Image: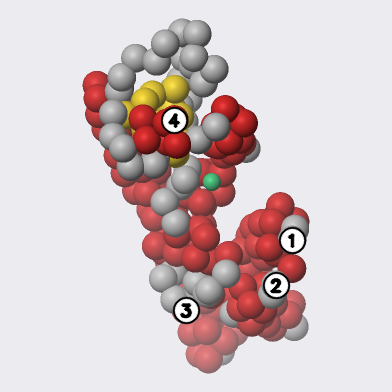
Amino acid sequence: MAAVVFGLLALLLAGPVPTWLARASWPIRSPRAALVLWQAIALAAVLSAFSAGLVIASWLLVPGPDGRPTTNPIDELRQLGIVPWTVAVIAFAFTLLIGARLITSTVRLAIRTRRRRARHRTVVDILSQAVDGDHPVSAADLRVLGVDEPLAYCLPGLRHRVVLSVGTINQLSHEELTAVLAHERAHLRSRHDLVLEAFTAVHHAFPGSPVVRGPGLGQAARRAPGG
Ligand SMILES: [Zn+2]
């Protein structure tokens, strides 16, 4: 019974619920609440799927001749019967597979993202122009690229950078520049990159899941971080 409840919950949270959230219009008005809800849904979907798998797999914990749970498949098979035993083994294997997939996807993405970001930071550090120390936007982590295209983004991490272009500085008023910098610094402070990274890892592990698909929030998650 518990397995059915967890299974249904996992299906609901992995499909219809995020689809509904992606179509809803209220996240535009309360993005912070929507992001927290979205994370909670994804986490609950993963935990429900794990729980369903583990509950079914726990059928294998039948007592052996000494009264303790046996690891002998013959004893398990004899006590459970062929169909429940097969279901339990498949559920256990599937649960392990989901776990392994999530872990490898998360680790692989974390390594790749940090490597790419470090390279990007080096390039930005080399190419950037010095900003006059008296300039209102001057800051230790700020880098200015000598291009006319309006650019403003951040590179998150411990050695973070805020990157602007000469075009942005020339085209914006002091108030507008302050607002842009505050926006980028909010990304860095709240570590929005980690939120996106977690969802990207889920997306890589399970590309079809609506948790990280759909026209609304899902698309926002796939946008380049730090913009
Ligand atoms: Zn932004």
Task: Measure how far apart labels 1 and 3 are at the Cα level.
Answer: 44 Å
Q: Earlier in the sequence, mark 3 or mark 2?
A: 2
Instruction: Identify residue for label 2.
Output: 25
User: From mark 3 to mark 4, how far is it between C-alphas?
Assistant: 59 Å
Badge 4 element = helix
The residue singled out by tag 4 in the image is 169
Q: Residues within 10 Å of mark 3 (few under 14, many from 20)?
A: some
Contact between labelled residues 2 and 4, with CB atoms less than 8 Å apart: no
From mark 1 to mark 2, how far is it between C-alphas?
8 Å
* 13, 159: nearer the viewer: 159
Q: Earlier in the sequence, mark 1 or mark 3?
A: 1
Identified by mark 2, the residue type is Ser
**3 vs 4, front mark:** 4
Amino acid under label 1? Answer: Arg
**Residue 44 bears which disc, if any?**
none
Judging by the rendered image, the residue that carries numbered circle 3 is 90
Locate residue 170: give its quadrant. Answer: top left
Pointer 1: residues within 10 angstroms few (<14), some, or many (20+)? few
Of circles 4 and 2, the one toward us is: 4
List x then y, in percent, for residue 58: 62, 70
Give the camera-side residue of 63 and 42. 42
Q: Amino acid at mark 4?
A: Ile
Q: Are marks 1 and 3 in contact (CB under 8 Å)?
A: no
* The label number, if any, that marks residue 29 in the structure image: 1
Among the two numbered marks 4 and 2 on one chain, the one whose residue lies closer to the N terminus? 2
**Relative to 111, 72 lies left or right:** right
Residue positioned 28% across, 34% down in the render? 147
Is the CB atom of the residue marked by disc 3 within 8 angstroms of ligand 1's nearest atom? no
Residue shown at 38% from the left, 53% from the top: 104
Of mark 1 and mark 4, the one earlier in the sequence is 1
Which structural element holds mark 2? loop
